[in-house]
Amino acid sequence: MAETASKKTEKTSGGGRPRLMLMDGHSLAYRAFFALPAENFTTATGQPTNAIYGFASMLANTLRDEAPTHFAVAFDVSRKTWRSAEFAEYKANRSKTPDEFKGQVELIGELLDAMRAPRFAVEGFEADDVIATLATQAEAEGFDVLIVTGDRDSFQLVTEHTTVLYPTKGVSELTRFTPEKVFEKYGLTPVQYPDFAALRGDPSDNLPGIPGVGEKTAAKWINQFGSFAELVERAEEVKGKVGQNLRDHLESVKLNRRLTELERQVELPKAVADLERAPYDRTGVAMILDTLEIRNPSLRERLFAVDPGAEVAETTPVAASGIELDGAVLGAGELKPWLAEHGHKPLGVATVDAWALGTGAVAEIALAAADGAAAWFDPAQLDEADEQAFAQWLADPARPKVLHNAKGAMRVVPEHGWSLDGVTMDTALAAYLVKPGRRSFALDALSLEYLGRELEPAALADGQLAFGADEGAEAEALMIQARAILDLGEAFEQKLREVGAADLLRDMELPVSALLARMERHGIAADRTHLEAMEQMFAGAVQQAVKEAHAAAGREFNLGSPKQLQEVLFGELGLPRTKKTKTGYTTDADALAWLATQTDNELPVIMLRHREQAKLRVTVEGLIKTIAADGRIHTTFNQTVAATGRLSSTDPNLQNIPVRTDEGRAIRRGFVVGEGFDSLLTADYSQIELRVMAHLSEDEGLIEAFTSGEDLHTTVASHVFGVDRSAVDPEMRRKIKAMSYGLAYGLSAFGLSQQLNIEAAEARALMDTYFERFGGVRDYLRRVVDEARATGYTETLFGRRRYLPDLNSDNRQRRETAERMALNAPIQGTAADIVKIAMLNVDRALREAGLTSRMLLQVHDEIVLEVAPGERDRVEELVRREMADAVRLRAPLDVSVGDGGDWESAAH
C-alpha cells in the first residue's frame, strides 16, 4: 500500500516526494466540539459524541483530499508543560473544560488506534512541539508535510515543503497557509512569525501584549528592524508612547518570544519512517462507531474509503472474504431438486426488502448452506413444482431457517400465498439481545464485527441489494448475504448462551416478531375525513399563534428562527436571559416555560402553544400520508430500538400521539373500527411499573398498598406524610404519584424538583421520607446499582440484560446517567417483557378459540384489538384472563379494558 499511496502523492504534490500529514488532536477535537451541538450527538447512555463525530469527519475528508503516505496525530497531555514551568500563568485564563468534552479525546484515541494511526502525547510538551519535531525531521528526510491545526503558532513551521491547513469555518473549511499565504496575511515570513506573535501577545495563551501595540504595529516593527532580537537591541529608536511601552514591557515580550518558539527536538518513540499508513482494523472501527451510536452511513463510508487497505479489498475476489460459495442462479424447474438436496439442513435466507420497495411481494431470494452450497432465484420465475416445493419447505417448522430481520419476510410472504415457519434464528434480534444498547443492526456491520467478513461493497447499499448492477453480481451479492446470515446465526447461538438470552430469543422475541408481522399486515382503519379536519384545525391554530406572537412582539418575525426569537425576547422585549449557549440564549421549551413565569408578556406562552400546535399538525399530516389504499394505517413495529425491550413504531410513530391531552384524544378518534368488525377493544395494565418495583423490592408496605384495594397513591401518601387516608389532599397525592413513577424511571431529587416545581431540598426531603416508610424500595435501588456496577449489566425477571459499562466511568456525567439507567432498566424491561408475554398469550388464545377478532396495535403499555361481531364478551374475558396470568407478581397485575367504535371511545 505504500507504493499506491506514493503514487497518489506524486499526482498531488509533484516530484514523487512522500507526504506526511500531522494533526493537532486536541485543537481539532475542541473546534469540532463547538462546531456541532452536543444535544444532537449523544448516545443512549448520555455520552456526547459531537467532538468525535466532527473530528472523524474532518479526518476522513483531509485523508481523502490530501492522500498522505504517512500520518500521525499529536495530543496534549495536560496544561503542565515546560512553558507553564517557565511562566506559571501560561494558559491560566482558560475556562474549565466542559464536562461534555471530557472523555471524547480518549474515545478519539481509540478510533485512531483502530485505524492504525500513530498518535503521540509526550509529558511536559504540547502537541505543537511534537508536530514541530516531526515536521522538521520529515522535511529533512525529503517529505512534504501537511499540518492540520487550529493553532496559529504552527505558521512558523511553514516552508516550501511544509503547509499548514488551518480551519476557518468550524472543521469543514481549511485554508492552506504556504509561505506566500503567511506573507499575504501578516506581511511577514513564517520565520518571523514567532517574533510577531511575541510582540502581539496571545490572549488565548494568557501571554500579555504591549499596550497600544496591535498586529499592524508588531508587523511594522519586525519589517523595520528585521527581527525581534534586533528590535530589542535597538528599542531606544522606537519613538512615542508605544516606544516607551515597548521598553517598559521588554522582559515580558522576551518571555513571550521564548514561549512562542516551538520545540523541534522532542524525544519521540517513533521516527517519521514508522508513520507510514497501514490498513485499518476495520472490525474495530465499525465496533467503535456502533458503540458510539454514530449511524451516519456517509461518515462510515468516507472513513472506510480512505483505508489504505481498501484498494486491496476492492480487487479481492469474493471467495477471499472468508468463504467458498458453490452458488447457482436457478431457473424454472431447478429449485425443487436443489431443496431436495440441501433443504433438510439449516439454511440462511436473504431477501430483498420488498416492502420497502413498495412491491408488496418478495422480489428475489437467496439460500445458503454451511457446506458452501448457495442458490438465487426470482419467485416470479418459479414453475408450479418449484413453487410448491418452496412453499412446503418455507412452512415446515422442522426445516431450520436463519434470517436477518425475519419480520420483514413474515410480513410479505403471504403476498405469494406462502407462510413462514421454522425460523430458528433472527440475526438482528440476536444481536440486539447480545448488545441491546447499540443502534445499528445492519447486516454488513454485524458481518464485519462478528465474522470479520466484509460484504461486497460494490453490490451493496446500506446492507440491501443495490439494483442496476449486472444480474450475476446481484445474485452473488445476495447469496453472500445469505451465507453471512447463516454464519452469524451460528455465532449468535454461542453468544446468546453466554449471556443467558437463548430462551428470550426462542420463546419471546421470535414469536413476538411473527405476531407483529401479522399486526402490521392488518393495520388499523383510519377516518380520513376526521383526520383532514384535524389537520386544518391545527393549521389554523398555528396561523393564529403566529398572529398573536407578532402582536406580542410588536412586529413580524420568523417564529421558526431561534436567532430572530432571541432578538425579540432578549433584545427588543428585554426579558430575563436564559441559559447561555454558543448561538445565544436558549429558547427551548423549558426556557420558554420558565420565561412565562418571569414576565407578564404573553410571547413565551404563545410560542409554546405555537410549537405544540405545529407538532400536532405534523403528526396528523404524517398519519394522513400513511393511509394505504385499503383505508388502513400499517405502522412498522420495532423490536430493536429501545434498550429496555419496549416496542416502538415508525411510519407512522404512534407513540407521538399524546395520550392525556384533548388534542391527542381527538386524534385517536381518527383510528376506527374497520369494515366487517364491530368495535375496537383496548386493554392495558394499571400501574405496571410500580407493581414490578414492589415485586422486585419485596417491600411489604408497598405490596400491601397494592393489595389493600384502595387508591395506591393515596395509600402511599398517607404513609409518607403520616396522615390518615382521608387527610391526603390532591397536592400530596400528586407529589407521591410523581415520585413513585420517578423512582421507577431512575428520577433524581433534582429531576423530581423540576417536575414538581419545588426546591431540590424539598424534593430530597420528600424522597428521604418515602424511603423511611418504604425501606425495601431504598435497599433495592441501592442493590441494583451496586450489582450492576460489579457485573456490568442489569437484568429483568426474564433474563433480559442491559449492559452499562459507564457505571465505572471516571466521567461523572456518564456515570450518573448509567446509574439512572441501572435503576430504570430492570423495572422498565420487566414491564416490557410482561407486555410481550401478554400479547403472545392473548393472540394464542384467540386463535385456539377459533375467534376472528385480532390484535392490531401495541402502543406504550396498551394493546388494541379489533372485535368481530358476536365476540365482544368472549374477547374481553379472554383478554383479562391471559393478561392477568402473564406472570405472577407479589403485587398482582390489574387489567383495564374498554371498547368503542374508535380508539378514543375504547379508552378505559
Image (cartoon, rainbow, N blue to C red):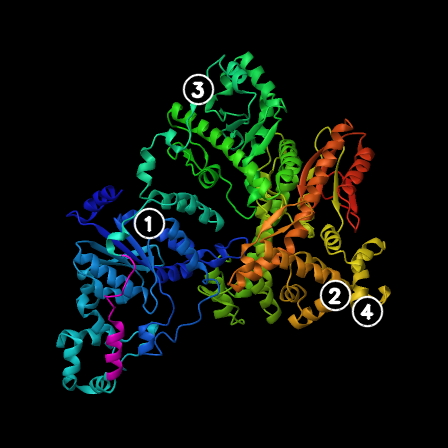
The amino acid type, in three-letter code, at marker 2 is Tyr
Disc 4 to disc 1, C-alpha distance = 65 Å
Q: Is residue 123 left or right of residue 17?
A: right
The image's mark for residue 61 is 1
Residue 585: which numbered mark, if any? none
How far across and down, in percent of the image, does residue 184 sit? 19, 64
Q: Which of 19/579 is in front?
A: 19
Q: Which label lies toward us, 3 or 1? A: 3
Callout 2: SS: helix
- Picture disc at residue 722: 4
Q: Is residue 262 magenta?
A: yes
Residue that carries the numbered disc 3 in the rendered image: 329
Of label 2 and label 1, which has the lower sequence position? 1
* 318 over 193 or under it: above or below: above
Nearest to N terminus: mark 4 or mark 1: 1
Which comes before the other along the chain, label 3 or label 1?
Answer: 1
Q: Which residue is mark 2?
A: 770
Q: Quadrant of the N terminus?
A: top left
- Determine the CA span between mark 4 and mark 2: 10 Å
Task: Please tell me which of labels 4 and 2 falls first in the chain.
Answer: 4
- From which residue to which does the magenta span run? 251-270
Label 3 is placed on what type of residue?
Val
Quadrant of residue 844 in the image?
A: top right
Of residue 152 and residue 827, the one placed in the foreground of this image is: 827
Is 629 magenta? The answer is no
